[in-house]
Image: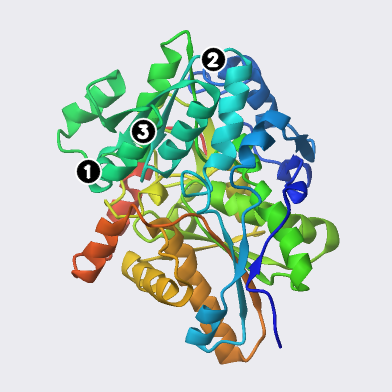
Amino acid sequence: MSFAKKILLNESDMPENYYNIQADMPNPTLPPLHPGTKQPIGPEDLAPLFPMELIKQEVSKERYIEIPDEVREVYRMYRPTPLYRATNLEKMLDTPAKIYYKYEGVSPAGSHKPNTAIAQAFYNKAEGVKKLTTETGAGQWGSALSFACAQFGIDLEVYMVKISYEQKPYRKVMMNTWGAEVIASPSNKTNSGRQILEQDPNSPGSLGIAISEAVERAATSDDTKYSLGSVLNHVLMHQTVIGQEAIKQLEMTGDFPDIIIAPFGGGSNFAGIAFPFLRYNFQEGKNIRCIAVEPASCPKLTKGEFRYDFGDTVGLTPLIPMYTLGHTFVPAPIHAGGLRYHGAGAIISQLLKDKLIEAVALQQIECFEAGVKFAKAEGIIPAPEANHGIAQVIREALKAKEEGTEKTILFNLCGHGYFDMSAYQDYFAGNLVDHELTDDELYSDLRKLETPPAA
């Protein structure tokens, strides 16, 4: 039997709307709270940080939000992205499962992140914003927003988690090439950074710390707004162009997924591939398993608590109802820097609380073993973050082999690893270690929280 290994769409098939899962969720998310009053926030509370159009999208319950023509025009540089059937991996695993992957590594920045970066840069430009600040872990988000800001003529200041700043110097060079200023976080440039450095001069940094610095800079500058690459509702919604395209591509194959898998940091990758398919579960009674894969060193979904917490370390952001390990939790310095975040987005957290999605936590050595197998079979060297999804794909494919079931598995290959060779070098040299966290290490930051519990 012959079948297409690479499934392409025409430009005319690119989505015209973002899909807003909030229109279809059985239970709505709890409202974010003001960090001072602990009362639900309004649009005016977010106005210092975000343009009004993004604030409207954050709270919208409309099922579809039209993608502006200017955004679609930039998308055309790389969208629609290809869908592949991983036939060589199937053969390597000797599995009856069909494995498909949506490949977002063809974007200029090499990941899925430009899908929201382009939209956010456009909406800021439309409201006259001259400069943005942001944070980045492994540098994928910072690279994407640097590229997007270059398209719309906006200045950008990026706070990059220090351990990734040191591990991934070429990500910094990418951002510089597109015109961004990149600062290792924690830094002496902000009160937030100085506060952290006073406590720990050798701090490796975290996404929470970098968010604090970027938010502080935006909140204290009249011509500057803040941009976030994950977690928030509008960010997850922008990524749904991935899943919408995948639906059309799978229709061309005659297959439909039983299982959808994506790595998980704050939720944008998982949301992008899974949310458009979850609509079939909500509206048509299908039973697609959607699995978010997080690192065992930062297991907020599998071992965290569902409660209100800050999105940043210092406590400058609104309180979000989330699964969290505590906003002061600093994960081990694993190479998958994009997954080193203490909490999860409100939508993801509500879906997990309602048992509508699943979550697993994997150790990094198993993930790199999976990435190397994938590279040998399919030719693409995945980013360390993507390896987490691939490791779970392999687990599910081998389970299908044991059970003799013909499952169809879809995963999001969110980006390539061509700037992550130092991570693979450490893997081959035997320098990577798995991180077994004690209960005290996991929960000490949660015990310090004075934030209200989520219902």
Dot 1 amino acid type: Glu
Dot 3 amino acid type: Thr
- Above or below for 137 versus 93: above
- Above or below for 75 versus 48: below
> Earlier along the polypeptide chain: callout 3 or callout 1?
1
Dot 2 amino acid type: Val
Q: Is residue 212 left or right of residue 25?
A: left
User: Percent from the top left, x then y, of residue 349?
Assistant: 58, 48
Look at mark 1 in the image and give the residue it sits on.
166
Pick whichever, 217 or 180, lies toward us. Answer: 180
Q: Residues within 10 Å of mark 1 (few under 14, many from 20)?
A: few
> Earlier along the polypeptide chain: callout 3 or callout 2?
2
Look at mark 2 in the image and give the residue it sits on.
129
* Element class at badge 3: helix
Pick whichever, 149 or 116, lies toward us. Answer: 149
Residue at the (32%, 55%) spot, across then down: 420
On residue 177, the disc is 3
Distance in Å between CA atoms under marks 3 and 2: 21 Å
Q: Residues within 10 Å of mark 3 (few under 14, many from 20)?
A: some
- Above or below for 318 versus 93: above
Distance in Å between CA atoms under marks 1 and 2: 31 Å
User: Percent from the top left, x then y, of residue 401?
Assistant: 57, 89
Q: Is residue 405 left or right of residue 209?
A: right
User: Percent from the top left, x then y, of residue 299?
Assistant: 41, 56
Q: Is residue 87 in view?
A: yes
Looking at the rendered image, the quarter that the N terminus falls into is: bottom right
